[in-house]
Image (cartoon, grey):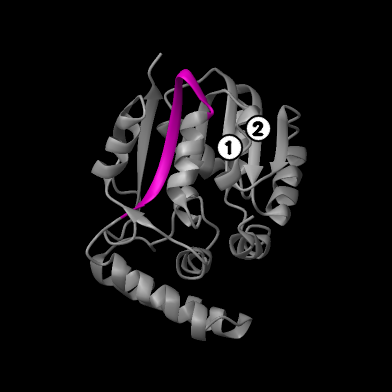
Amino acid sequence: MDLATKEFYDDFWPRFVPIYDETKKYMLETLTERQIGRALDAGCGHGICSVILSEMAEQVVSVDVSSDSLATARQQAQRFGRDNIEFHHQDLQELDTNLGPFDLVWCWGVAMMAPDPMKVMRNLMAVTKPGGTVYLGLYLKTWLSPVHEGVRHFCRAYMDTPARRKLVGGFFTGLTKVACALKGQEINRRADNVSIQAQVEDWYYPPYKTFYSIEEIVALFERNGFKAECIQDRLGRMKSATIFVIRATKNA
């Protein structure tokens, strides 16, 4: 099991549960499906996406490497009165394929945080039933990705105490406010996120992070019997720090 990622998100998601209404709005804008048989929330984290999927699916299976995140996700299921979600403590790199097959797989901003993202993606393809669909969000590779990685490694090596994390969060929050003010934009916080500090921590402190091009992920799916397209190419306001989303349907 990926213990480093488990440890990070054991601490992170119980503190930073996203906003339900904004998360639901985004998911409804992203998902084509409205009635789903079985759905997999691959890397469920806080559990809000699992709750929203459960409103459209007959059954949701939620998997995460972080036991404390799963506890938070169970709390969200109870909070919203959803009883058609089952939770499993598993590393997606070693996903039990017997949990499938699934009509829909949702994996938003998770696969690229594993030591071996390709293994995660292959497992997601394996548990998708013919005719089923995968929604996969990954970090976009840009010319500034090595810079982001350099900052992340510095933060983890030298700024990884509660006080120093707060300092890093405050610095980037201030920088963001100034940049947005100069551009006449609203503060650069995703609508579903609770704070800029949460975004900064999730960007610069996870133990693993891999960036991809849209073309290589589309090609990966198509080599494995899927029809794939990019449905969202830049979700972040910063062009160098953004996620793209692939929708891939498995050939029947």
Q: Nearer the viewer, residue 63 or 35?
A: 63
Asked if residue 83 shows in the view, the reply is yes
Up-down relation of residue 203 to residue 252 (above or below) = below
First to last magenta residue range: 127-140
Q: Which quarter of the figure is the C terminus placed in?
A: top left
Above or below, comparing residue 7 to residue 119 in the picture: below
Specify which label sits upstream in the sequence, 2 or 1: 1
Count the labels in the image. 2
Disc 2, SS? strand
What is the spatial separation of the Cα atoms under label 2 and label 1, in whole angstroms? 6 Å
**Residue drawn at 24 percent across, 42 percent down:** 215
* Discs 2, 1 touching: Cβ within 8 Å: yes
The disc at residue 41 is 1
Residue 57 vs residue 62, the one in the foreground: 62
Q: Is 215 on the left or on the right of 82, as rendered?
A: left
Closer-to-camera residue (55/65): 65
Q: Is residue 250 magenta?
A: no
Residue 108 appears anywhere in the view: no
Asked if 119 appears above or below 66 in the picture, the reply is: above
In x, y percent, where is residue 41? 58, 37
Rendered position, 191 above or below 32: below
Instruction: State the quadrant of the N terminus.
Output: bottom right
Residue type beneath disc 1: Asp
Q: Is residue 86 left or right of residue 108?
A: right
For image coordinates 29% across by 36% down, the residue present is 218
Q: Which residue is mark 2?
A: 61
x then y, percent, for residue 179: 30, 72
The residue lying at 62 percent from left, 49 percent from top is 45
Three-letter amino acid code of the residue under disc 2: Val
